[in-house]
Image (cartoon, rainbow, N blue to C red):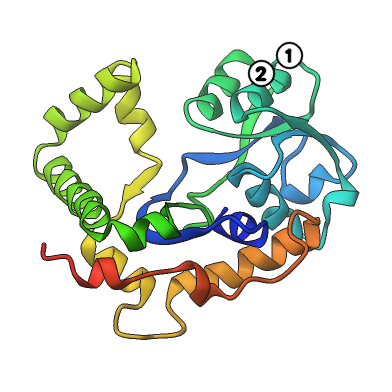
Amino acid sequence: MVRIESAHGLPATCILKLDDSYGADGIVSSKDITEVAGLRSQSIAVEKGSPSHFFLLSMLKEENLTAKDVQMLFMPTAGDAAAVFTAGRAKAAVTWEPYLSSSTKQSPNAHVLVTTREKPGLLLDLLLANSDYAKANPDAVNGVIKAWFDAVKFWKTNPAQANSTIAKGLGVSDQELSEMLKGCKYADYPENATYFGLQGNSSAPFFEGFAQAQKVWLEAGLMTKTVNADSVIDVSFLKGITV
């Protein structure tokens, strides 16, 4: 999403990778659709401009299909997309957990067509900061980043206690949270160092993913101009962190 925000003139700077989706996002469809190519001409509920939208466009692209080859039903949220599907008003929906699993439980004729587990690295969460704020308040930004790494470390060493705390905050049971987290991989400092190429590697995953996403959004018409990847990333905060 940093591509869209920057292309629309919003002063967003990427400062941290939070997690990778590893099965938490995907496409649910009726069972008669057995492959992504089978989505051709079908109605698909999806939140416009969202990670779900990007996932759908990327999956279609792999099958040499475009948005024009399907009937997209744009919904306000991924939850609404799932609801439209379970109500029988769409042949497929792009959503995330817990809606991905609940959709198949509510609809006997539904199944999960594809998820990010089969496409690792395609969807992830990044933390953005207002560029002006970050420059004026480096200590605050460093504090947020340090707190994230401390939280990830605590979660890895005390999973039961951490999950219970997270579940309480989200208003779900410990078991429900455990199922949700199976599709998510939190990013610690080493993962961030690799992802952003802190040693100056221009082929770091961030730049590759940025280029891929930018191409998808441009083709979809949600971006009208290209954005230089270097202009929306600031690794100085990560480099200054001691973990």
Q: Is residue 122 visible?
A: yes
* Above or below: residue 145 compared with residue 171: below
Please, what secondary structure does the residue beneath circle 2 have?
Answer: helix
Question: Residue 68 at what x, y percent from top left?
Answer: 90, 50
Front-lying residue, 31 or 57: 57
Query: In this picture, is 233 found above or below 146?
Result: below
Which residue is more in the foreground, 53 or 92?
A: 53
Is residue 174 something one can see in this rendering? no
Do the CB atoms of the residues marked 2 and 1 lie less than 8 Å apart? yes
Percent x, y of residue 99: 54, 25
Circle number at residue 17? none
Q: Residue at x 61, y 30 (%)?
A: 78
Which label is found at residue 83?
2
Q: Which residue is mark 1?
A: 87
Q: Is residue 188 above or below residue 228?
A: above
Q: Position of residue 25 (x, y in %)?
A: 53, 41
Badge 1 amino acid: Ala
Quadrant the C terminus occupies:
bottom left
Q: Amino acid at mark 2?
A: Ala
Q: Residue at x 15, y 36 (%)?
A: 159
